[in-house]
Image (cartoon, rainbow, N blue to C red):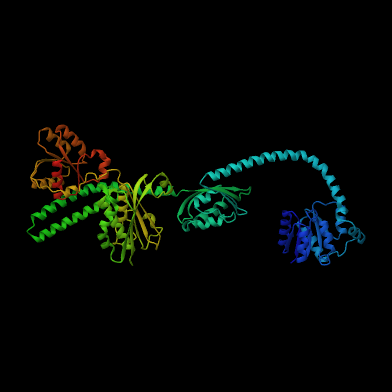
Amino acid sequence: MVQALVVDDKEENVYYLRALLEASGHQVVAASNGMVALEKAQIVPPDIIISDLLMPQMDGYALLQAWKSDPVLRDIPFIVYTATYTEPEDEKLARDLGCDEFLLKPTEPDIFLSVMNEVLQRGSVKQPAHAAALARYDKEPLFKLYSHTLVRKLEEKSTELERVNRVLRQDIERRERAEAALRENEERFRLLAQATTDVAWDWDIATNYYWVSDGWSHVLGRPVPASGKVGDVWQALLHPDDRARVLETLQKDLRSSAHVRSIKYRLRHGNGQWLHIDERTQIVRNEKGQAIRAVGGFIDITRQVRLEEQVQRTQRLESLGQLTGGVAHDFNNLLTVILGNAQLLSEEVERDPRLVTLANMVLQAAEKGAELTRHLLAVARRQPLEPERLDAEKVVRGMLPLLKNVLGTRVQIRLSFAQALPPILVDAGQLDNALLNLAVNARDAMVEGGCFTISAEAVQVNEESTETDPGLPLKPGDYVALSVADTGSGISADDLPHVFEPFFTTKAEGQGSGLGLAMVFGFALQSGGHVSVESEPGQGAKFTLYLPCAQGDATSGGRVSSFDETLSKTESKGVVLIVEDDVDVRDYVKNALKSAGYQLQLARSPEQALELLQQGQVCDLLFTDILMPGMNGRELAKRARAIRPGLKVLYTTGYAGHDIHNSLGQSELDSHVLHKPYRREKLVVAVELAMRS
């Protein structure tokens, strides 16, 4: 293997010779002028030197003279390889100074290698060809000896330069205009790239060189990598589940004839979150159809994806709600009959303990059925809510005894509440249920015990915060963020997006219904708030309920529970007109109110009820179902009051509050609503309160 010293001030010439010689198994050392070449050769003498003539500082002639004058270097073969000094006089001067071969650029690679090998085989010319010439060169400065050659070449080129000068000026003007346009376009592109928050890039496939816009830092929260590292960094940021698919399709698109590439995947942000990315790329190909360049960009569509997931989740809940609402109506009618008659039966057989036990079992089963219906309505966000002004801290502290029983002695409870929390406007019972469900989940996640932390703080949501956190689809306003955190096993990344879906559970069969978190989610959304979750495997979980603050003097609406809190101790009775299309429910209400001392009139439809009133039937209270075939309860009450002004009305329904509001509108509910199923005492108290109103 030969070590060659290549001396040329032009990098492209050095690159060519290096590629040629290394391909033939030789080593190459490069120098940009004669002075550098001498320094390198004196440190490590090469096997052969190949030098240009026209170079700065020390040109090839001066280098050749110094080389052949050096006792160590003069035995090393010297080849002149020039494109400037091409005349016979130039070659003669070089040979007089002792060069071994004189080659003109460009020389065919095979010829060049053949000449080089021949020189190596025969060895160097130790002395110049003409001793007399060398003596002359020693006496005069070298630049004088070949200055006439340079003058001659300048004269030859002068005419040619003048001839092409006009053309060059025209070319320069055109180039200047083109460069100005290019600079303008580049500046426009730079400004566009800076103005957008998206990421743009330009990839030279052959050199693997990337240009990336500043949007990289904005979107990914990471510094822009070096141009040669962009591809590696991008691959490292790909989600493990997406990496194989993305890289395989990339190679496939580059090998195919495709010119446009579109793909979606996930990249890890600098804060550890996974971003959903939409990439669009234009593939540039050469005349052979080979991909040589790719220009494109990607945008962060995480907010869009989360909103789509939210819409899909809402649509699923809406479908479930429609199904649940219809089923709940029929089921509540059945439960009303079962619950009421079982209670009456229990009172009738109170002297027979065995029959009382059986009747109570029926009552308990009916209550459980009613509770299950309420759970399904909560999941579907169709439960009748009774929002009231609450102090979140008082609610939590009031639940501590129950929470301690649920969590057990191995779990420590910690509370952390901000000062002066504003009151919230939610349903107290449903808030208790939500906290209880979250506590049960935390207990199951902390098998070995741990810490259960409840905290709360006031937060203000504005347009900016909803833009920056797409996972928080809240209307602008004031909220209390009530957080529940545990130190349990955490939730896997695959399960995290599904935790609020109805019937989704990671517990063993028979250990969970999959409705607990779905109920929490439904309650939060129906209350005008939201719920979020943060968790990683082994790091516990944190659920945050965003509950709307009570505005002004907001208080609870008409609460059905008030019927349970007030028992009549008077003997005030009257005539009740019962309008109910379900015959079993109608008969049960008749028996319950008759035993309470009321006089009753029955109507199976609104039309029949109006006929009775028009005929002069005495009526102190209209007790009517809300949604019936044909005329609804609200329309019936309106027409009945036209016949009998000041008539008192009590509504009842087996439908959820959501469906009633959709049918009649919130403003139309001007009287109390008694929701099915109900016990006899609740029915009686409701009627008494309506009579007094």
Relative image position of residue 605 (x, y in whole percent): 16, 39
List the single residue furthest toward the right: 132
Considering depth in this image, is 490 or 514 the residue closer to the camera? Answer: 490
Res 416 quadrant in image: bottom left
**Figure label count:** 0
Q: In which quarter of the image is the N terminus?
A: bottom right
Q: 539 above or below 249? A: below
Give 76 or 68, whichever is nearer the viewer: 68
Q: Is residue 679 left or right of residue 2?
A: left
Residue ID at (11%, 55%): 346
Q: Quadrant of the C terminus?
A: top left
Q: In this view, does 569 lie to the left or right of 541?
A: left
Q: Which residue appears at 45% of the width and 55% of the height?
A: 273
Quick one: which residue is furthest to the left in this view?
351
Q: In which quarter of the image is residue 345?
A: bottom left
Q: Residue 524, position in %: x, y?
A: 32, 50
Q: Judge whether 262 appears above or below 272 on screen.
A: above
Whether residue 280 is visible to the viewer of this picture, yes or no, is no
Point out residue 2 in the picture as x, y percentages from the top left corner.
75, 65
Q: Is residue 346 left or right of residue 125?
A: left
Q: Position of residue 255 (x, y in %)?
A: 57, 53
Q: Nearer the viewer, residue 132 or 103?
A: 132
Residue furthest toward the front? 419
Asked whether the viewer can see residue 211, the reply is yes
